[in-house]
Amino acid sequence: MTSKIKVDNINKVSDDSNIIKKCGTTTTIGSGASNPIVVDGSAVTLGRCGGTVALASGATQSGFGRTGTVDWITTKKTSDFTAANGEGYFVDTGSGAVTVTLPGSPSPTNIVSVSDYNGTAGTNTITIARNGSNINGDASNFQINKEDSAITFVYVDATVGWTSVQTSNTEDATRIVTPFIIATGGTETDSGDCRIHTFTGPGTFCVTNEGTGCNQIVSHMVIAGGGGGGHDDGGGGGAGGFREVKNPVTPYTASPLDGYPSAPNRVTISSPGGIPITVGAGGAGGIPGGANCGVAQTGSNSIFSTVTSAGGGFGDRGQPSGGPGGSGGGGDAQSSGGTGNTPPVSPAQGNNGGTGGTGNAGAGGGGAGATGGNGSGSAPGASGGPGGAGVTTSINASPVTRAGGGGGGAYGSRGSGGSGGGGCGATYPNTQATAGSTNTGGGGGGGATSTGPRDGKNGGSGIVIIRYKFR
């Protein structure tokens, strides 16, 4: 026979208070808030299969871990504060920017959420301060600058730190919220915290996030195609226009032509989208009896956003002067050089070409850093003028000199190409001129006397380089 003990209530001996009390279908264990219930066993099961275990209103739990969600604090935050693990916050920046500091010394699976309270983060930023930990693998604070945005962070480890596992935006869910530009295009390389995009031909700079504040201003260098050299003791081609802006947040050694902070020279990335890139070709060298009556050609412009660099001027042969352009082309015998910095910008994008000699001596084309050299003398001791020097910048993480002018051709000694890709001039009886170097904007060298290597050579193509802070 099975034994049974039937009882409704169990009371303490000391004060006759209830320890277990049955009332209808409810059994109450314990005798007050200050008396915890401790169940000691290797396995404790609460509830039945398919049933629910619920906490009473106002009760809290511990030791069960989180479920990947947060408890939202419905009282909005209007000033700077430090977040706590497991909580979500509505942040109102209607009266000014707010900084949310993440918990210090976090443990894996710590979780925090932040939401723009009333669509004002687009005007006043919510900054997520990292408090010594990385955010998405970077030692940088995070910014929410799009209205109606929300984001959840989970702490992973010391390397990644807090990672964003969920983002949303009622206007555009893809546009949350990093203070740095995110973009693709050209050949991409990194130098420290800077990303570099190099375009050696036409392309598109594709922006998916525009960043915030001073990070929206990109450093850039835009060089146009160099001018072609003139034939028959002709002038060297002028270098393509050279324009550069260095944003101080992207540290490197810029050229002397750095145009920061002048507003007309800056390019600010204010929204996502594609920005077409034009890289100018070098101008054709002059060939006796060839196209355009043998006259050399001006280089083509290079363009990035609002910045246009002008193609280098052509080296002269039989014209009143060398051609105008980013840098001017050199004159042929007894003619003047072309005007540089045409159209004018500040800082100047280039220099004038040199003046030809009294006899068989072409002048050098202008370079970004110096005027083209003058030709001198007459055959057989004529000297071609050297091309004007280019300038050096480290925008692509190493110092490179570009935009040198082409050297003048001569019956005697030829003009040297300007540093930075300028081609050398020709000389009698059999030394040919050389072309401007590819992707430097260097001017082409001028040809020599009509009884020798007569042809002028092509200018070098241009280049566009963009640099910005990406972390």
Image (cartoon, helix red, strand yellow):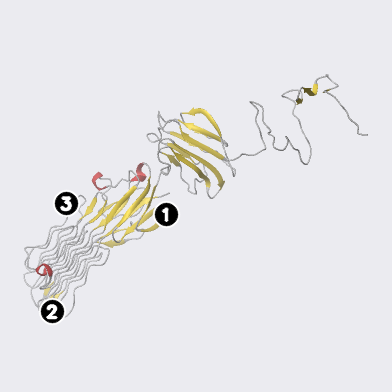
Q: Secondary structure at mark 3?
A: loop
Asked if residue 260 is positioned above or below residue 51 in the image, the reply reads below
Q: Which residue is mark 2?
A: 452
Residue 246, can we see it? no
Q: Where does label 1 land, which residue? A: 192
State yes or no: discs 2 and 3 in contact (Cβ < 8 Å). Answer: no
Residue placed under numbered mark 3 in the picture: 344
What kind of residue is marked 2? Answer: Gly
For residue 115, side relative to residue 155 (left or right): left
Residue 281 picture quarter: bottom left
Type of the residue with mark 1: Gly
Specify whether 56 is left or right of 226: right
Query: Residue 268: image x %, image y %?
Result: 31, 45
Work out whether residue 249 or residue 264 is closer to the camera in this orientation and state it.
Answer: 264
Q: Which mark is residue 155?
A: none
- Residue 274, placed above or below residue 81: below
Residue 151 screen position, x and y as percent: 48, 39
Do we see residue 459 in this rendering? yes
Numbered circles on residues, count: 3
Looking at the image, tell me whether mark 2 or mark 1 is earlier in sequence order. Answer: 1
Instruction: From the viewer's side, name the closer residue of 387 and 154.
Output: 154
Residue most extreme to the right: 1
Where is 33 relative to 370, above or below? above
Q: Quadrant of residue 195?
A: bottom left
Seen in the picture, residue 69 relative to 304 is either above or below; the reply is above
- Left or right of 433, for residue 65: right
Q: Quadrant of the N terminus?
A: top right
Dot 2: what SS? loop
The span from disc 3 to disc 1 (Cα, nearest Å) is 35 Å
